[in-house]
Each structure stands twice: as structure tokens, then as C-alpha cells.
Amino acid sequence: MLNWFIYLLKTPFMLWSVLIINVLGTIYGYIWYGVQLKDTPAIFLIFVPDSPTASLFFVFVLIGFILKKNFKLFEALAIVTLVKYGIWAVVMNILTLLETGYLPIEGYMLIFSHGAMAVQGILYSPYYRFTIWHLVIAAVWTLHNDVIDYVFKMMPWYGSLIKYMPQIGYFTFWLSVFSIGVAYYFSIRKGRQKLALD
């Protein structure tokens, strides 16, 4: 059943549907970061909007799939960042609910949409063809982004959670390591599921 579903993911209808959803989500994500980006020094701008950049990486992956091509570096960047920031946003919204006792409707929407980000990154992994060197570059990007967020204090604004920045930074570092491991397990290790785009 799962293999049938994964095969269905590469059909033109599904690829275009997932592409449109990710394009719209990416646009919304950059808009969501708008206020923070206005106060962000130019040198850090590329590193601040974490989730929309992750979905933007995946947009390029999907365009490649539609063209029957593998954009390998984007594949590596996509799976690592989709898993990382998908899980991260779910956890932060749940923590916000626990901290404040309230979560607006957009918070629940973010839990659903970011959970789906992580899932889609893994579901498409049988079609990825990146190598260990692409994963190394994605790992450097991801861990460097953690430094920007928690050393230079460019992390996403989450209101009442700001007082837990050291703990969140520690959690995020290990989440990065976990996401890199997930990318290796599903996309590079010997014996992993491997399907062709054709």
C-alpha cells in the first residue's frame, strides 16, 4: 500500500499539486516573516526565514522531478531542512500552547502545515539521488544556520518562548543532527528504497 502511494507521488498530477501547495506555502512563509525581516541586518537575511526557505528548496526539487531531473544539492538541502523545521515549528507551537495556555488558529495551522513539510520530505526520498558530499554541504548550511539563530540571536520570534532561547538553541542543534541522520538513512545508506522518476 505504501509503495503504491509513493509511486503515485511521482505522477504529473501529484507533482504539480504538491508544487503549487509548496509555492503558496513558501510565499505565505516569507510574508509571515515580514516583520522580523524588516528588523534583520542585511547580512543575516538569507538565514532568518527558515521554514519558507526549506519549502523553497523543495520547490526546486519538485521542478526537477517534473523535468525528470535530480537537482541533487536541493534534494539534500530540502530533506534536511524540511524535517528539521517541520518538527521544530510543531514543537514550538505546542510549547507556546503549554506556556500560555492559548494558541491562535494560525498556530494550529502551522502545526499541521509544518508536520506535512517533514512528512513530504521523507516520502519523496526514494526519488532523491544526492551523494554524501551534497549531504555534507546541507549539514554545513543547517548547522551554520543554528549559529546565526542562537549565537547572533536571529531565531524566529515566538513571543513568550524567547526566555528559553538557550534551551531551544540546544534542542535545535540536536534536531539538526537528527535531521541530517534522517537524510542519510532515507536517501544514501545501502539498502534504502530507491525508485526511478521515469
Image: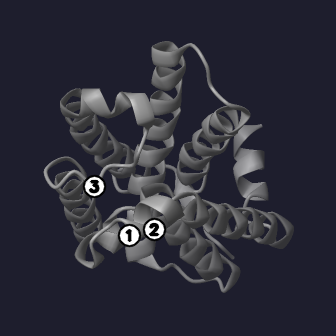
Classify residue 167 as left or right of residue 159. left
**Image-quadrant location for residue 45:** bottom left
Q: Please tell me the numbered disc located at residue 75.
A: 2
The residue mark sitting in front, 3 or 1, is 3
**Quarter of the figure that contains the N terminus:** top right
Q: Which residue is mark 1?
A: 130
The front one of 134 and 29 is: 29
- Say above or below: 5 vs 20: above
- Residue at the (27%, 27%) spot, across then down: 164
Q: Amino acid at mark 2?
A: Glu
Is any atom of residue 195 visible in this view?
A: no
Task: Using the image as rendered, state which of residue 6 and residue 63 is in the foreground.
Answer: 63
Q: Name the image quarter holding residue 160.
A: top left
The answer to whether 93 appears left or right of 141 in the picture is right
Look at label 1 and name its amino acid. Answer: Phe
Can you give x and y, in whole percent of width and height, for residue 4 in the image?
77, 47
Position of residue 139 measured from the top left corner of the image (x, y, whole percent): 24, 59
